[in-house]
Amino acid sequence: APWAHEAHRQRITQVQPASDMTAPSTMGMVHFRTNLKRERLLEDRYMEIDRENQHLLKKMSEAMKKPNPYILKPDTDKPASLNRNARKADLTRITQENQRMLKAIQLTKPVYDTKKWEEGFQKSAVLLKNVCAYPVITRMPRTASSPSVLMTIEPETGAGATGGSASYAAAEQEDNKHVLKEGMRIGEKYFLLEFTTDGRALTISAYDGDSQTTLELVVKEKKHRQLYRELNGDYSLMAARIRVDGDRLMVD
């Protein structure tokens, strides 16, 4: 019934606990409020630290009272030097000699002339530049293409020169030497290449048998020497660099 349930709930709210949760009366005793054992251990530890500090302080005091063994004190018990004046005279003489040598070194003129060194260096630089620009070209074995040979070409002497332009051209034609003559394919055509040189400039002729035409290219001396050094004097390698651009020969 509803009234029985309500009565049960009311009795539950009025129920008192059977266990006593209050602090016991013994907690008021002194040995519960103070840990005497821990205090005793701390007191013993503090006494030990104080005893060690006293021992260390005693050692430091004794060490400070002892004389420092690393400080050298003059020995007053030894007799005075018997040759003091002689050693002082030797020191004075050595000092004067050093001063004389220093003065002589400062007044001595240099033997080497830096100006002459600079002039010699500039002269060597000019010679080195000339050697690099005009190297000595030696002959190569016949297994490779024949290199050019540097030859001396006499310049024109002006109005006093003997002979006309025809004789000069004939002499120049005689000085030209063939260094390479071979056929090779350039692009889609087959050409007969002919290299001639007077030791300075290089003339390249390429003859096309199909069209019966000849293409020519004159390589100036500076470019000729540059290619010669790069290819180690092998004109066959130089021929491999030739290409045809329209109706002109080109060397890469």
Image (cartoon, rainbow, N blue to C red):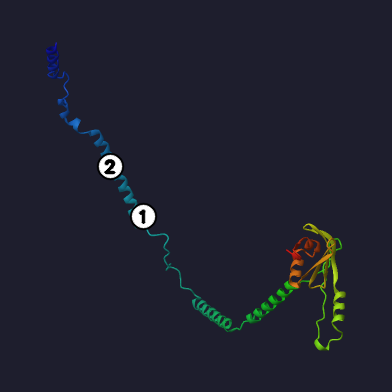
> On the picture, is 26 further left or further right than 188?
left
Q: Residue at x 78, y 57 (%)?
A: 188
> On the picture, is 244 further left or further right than 174?
left
Kind of residue sitting beneath label 2: Tyr
Name the mark nearer the viewer: 1 or 2: 2
Q: Residue at x 67, y 78 (%)?
A: 122
Quarter the N terminus occupies: top left
At numbered mark 2, what does the secondary structure look like: helix, strand or loop? helix
| 10 Å crowding of disc 1: few (<14), some (14-19), many (20+) | few
Q: How far across and down, in percent of the image, does residue 167 sit?
A: 87, 81
Camera-nearest residue between 176 and 46: 176
Numbered mark located on residue 231 in the image:
none
Q: Which residue is mark 2?
A: 46
When the figure is inspected, residue 32 is found, relative to residue 177, above or below; the finding is above
When the figure is inspected, residue 52 is found, relative to residue 224, above or below; the finding is above
> N-terminal of the two: label 1 or label 2?
2
Q: How far across and down, in percent of the image, does residue 189 sit?
A: 80, 58
Q: Label 1 to label 2, Cα distance in Å?
A: 26 Å
Q: Residue at x 70, y 74 (%)?
A: 129
At numbered mark 1, what does the secondary structure look like: helix, strand or loop? helix
Q: How far across and down, in percent of the image, does residue 17 sit?
A: 15, 19
Q: How far across and down, in percent of the image, does residue 143 sit?
A: 86, 60
Which residue is most to the bottom? 160
When the figure is inspected, residue 182 is found, relative to residue 163, above or below; the finding is above
Q: Which residue is mark 1?
A: 63
Which residue is most to the top? 1
Kind of residue sitting beneath label 1: Ala
| 10 Å crowding of disc 2: few (<14), some (14-19), many (20+) | few
